[in-house]
Amino acid sequence: MSKLTVTFLGTGTSQGVPVIACGCATCTSKDTKDNRLRSSVMLSFKEKNYVIDSGPDFRQQMLANNVKSLEALIFTHAHKDHMAGMDDVRAFNFKQKRDMPVYCDTIVEQALRREFYYVFQKNSYPGIPRVLICNFDKNPFQAGDLTFVPIEVVHYKLPVKAFRIGDFTYITDAKTISDQEIGKIMGTKILVVNALKREEHPSHFNLEEALAFIERVQPEKAYLTHISHLFGRHAEISKELPGNVAIAYDKLKLEIDYNG
């Protein structure tokens, strides 16, 4: 059985942490675990890297983690904090001498064509990112050597895709998940789920809701991500969590058995 390495490239919400011009205790914390780029993870398997979401910090994340190659980019949904950095795949285009496979649903594809219109024009400008759009629906799909099982969650009223890859499940920007979709998650060993803050929020799990969801799924280990500065400081919240739950932080790495 081979090992799948999961690297948390970013664990923050849309503003990141610290937030511009904020002087709260979290934003001024000296603990590096309280510094959070926009949410994204990298899956590394058989020396190939796959990134879920390229937000505004994508370039910084690739440099900070010394990423030299990228097999594919996979999108959860069309919000800017998850797709704004797609332009920077052109560095990989140049080095790898091929178009970048981009896996997304049709809603994200429409947003990419709108926001990055110059990528898809017939008479395109030289040096733009070169992408190959690969649409997926509700069925499992193959990206390189990995099989992704899409899981539909709802972010206020927007459908968002979570993904299960073997015994690892990654969920971001979820507020509600149907029983049918939860069925796809059951049995997962490592669960990553968003927990924005303590207080109720219309489009994200808060801490209480995230913990209740983890209790229902019963993974061996769960990690909280997509965290706001209003959540509190990493060290303080960590003391309150159940033994099988931890707060993810930028550059955290997990090793997971994966057999396809």
Image: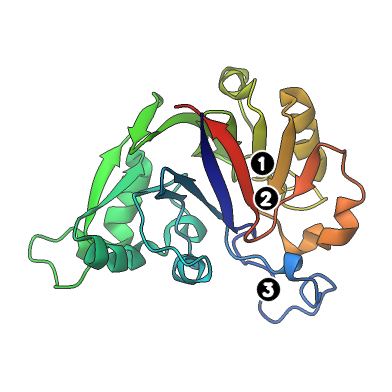
Q: Earlier in the sequence, mark 2 or mark 1?
A: 1
Q: CA distance from mark 3 to mark 2?
A: 16 Å
Q: Nearer the viewer, mark 3 or mark 2?
A: 2
The residue carrying mark 1 is 193
Q: Amino acid at mark 3?
A: Val
Please, is residue 169 above or below residue 97 in the view?
A: above
**Residue 227 x, y percent position in the rendering:** 70, 56
Residue indicated by mark 3 = 19
Camera-nearest label, 3 or 1: 1
Q: Residue furthest front?
A: 1
Q: Where does the C terminus fall, quadrant-wise?
A: top left
Residue 37 relative to residue 101: left or right: right
| Residues at circles 3 and 1 in contact by the CB criterion of under 8 Å | no
Q: Residue at x 49, y 46 (%)?
A: 43
Residue in the image at 21% along x and 62% along y: 119
* Sequence order check, earlier mark of 3 and 2: 3
Q: Determine the secondary structure under disc 1.
A: strand
Would you say 197 lies left or right of 144 here? right
Name the residue beneath numbered marker 2.
Answer: 225
User: Disc 2, disc 1: CB below 8 Å?
Assistant: yes
Q: Is residue 132 left or right of residue 168?
A: left
Residue 170 visible to the viewer: no
Q: Nearer the viewer, residue 127 or 80?
A: 127
Compared to 18, does 196 lie above or below? above
Q: Is residue 60 visible?
A: yes
Q: Residue furthest left?
A: 123
In the rendered structure, the answer to whether residue 25 lies left or right of residue 133 reads right
